[in-house]
Image: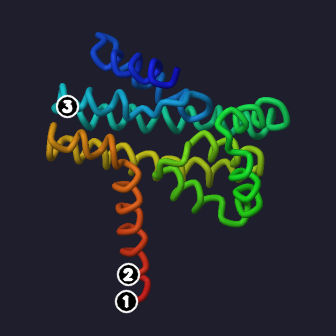
Amino acid sequence: MLKRIYDWTLRLAGHRHAMVWLALVSFVESSVFPIPPDALLIPMVLARRERAWQYAAVCTLASVIGGYLGYAIGYFLFETVGRWIIAVYHLESQFTGFRDTFNHYGGWIVLAKGMTPIPYKLITIAAGATRLDLATFTVASIGARGMRFFLVTGLLWWFGEPIRDFIERRLGLVTVAFLLLLVGGFLILKVL
């Protein structure tokens, strides 16, 4: 079933309303949809490189707005809908440990994990369930999702088609490496 959803998502990239579909997929992926918007973003950027940055911006904005839906699920509906979504993705054990430390490091967790392959919906629901400050959630989400989608777009814009397979197979590795470089840079600046 997941393969069919992925193939359907890829077909949307060639649709005349692809930008609308990109926004919609980015929005719902932040709270319930299993396929990341990269499945649309990658072929769209490769097809129309002149619109690459616009696609990344739409992806980022829609994902952050969709994150508010995930936050609302966690805040208002965690005991019913939130627990069900977490169970569907078999993330119960991860969520328990995640929730315990979330309030203490909430903004940093959203920033760091929002860039990685960890499902963003887990982060948005956890933010609502733990009542993370909405301003902190918003700033961290914009930073995380923006870095993630602009990094993918930048790689595609710069390297074109040859980087596509690498990104599709190793997106997690690319984002973790970028995150480590970013944090390392901040640590170096702090020490100097």
CB contact under 8 Å: marks 1 and 2:
yes
At which x and y percent is residue 26?
Answer: 47, 30
The residue that mark 2 highlights is 189
Q: Residue at x 54, y 30 (%)?
A: 34
Q: Residue furthest right?
A: 79
Name the residue at 26% across, 28% down.
43
Percent across and percent down for residue 44 are: 26, 27
For the C terminus, the quadrant is: bottom left
Residue at the image position 43 percent from the left and 25 percent from the top: 23
Q: Secondary structure at mark 3?
A: helix
In-image side of 140 versus 101 (left or right): left
Q: Note whether 29 is above or below 24 in the view shown.
A: below
Q: Amino acid at mark 3?
A: Leu
**Badge 1 is on which residue?**
192
| Residue picked out by circle 3 | 46
Query: Please, what is the three-letter code of the amino acid marked with disc 2?
Result: Leu
Q: Where residue 187 sits: x, y (%)? A: 43, 79
Judged by depth in the image, the label closer to the viewer, 3 or 1, is: 3
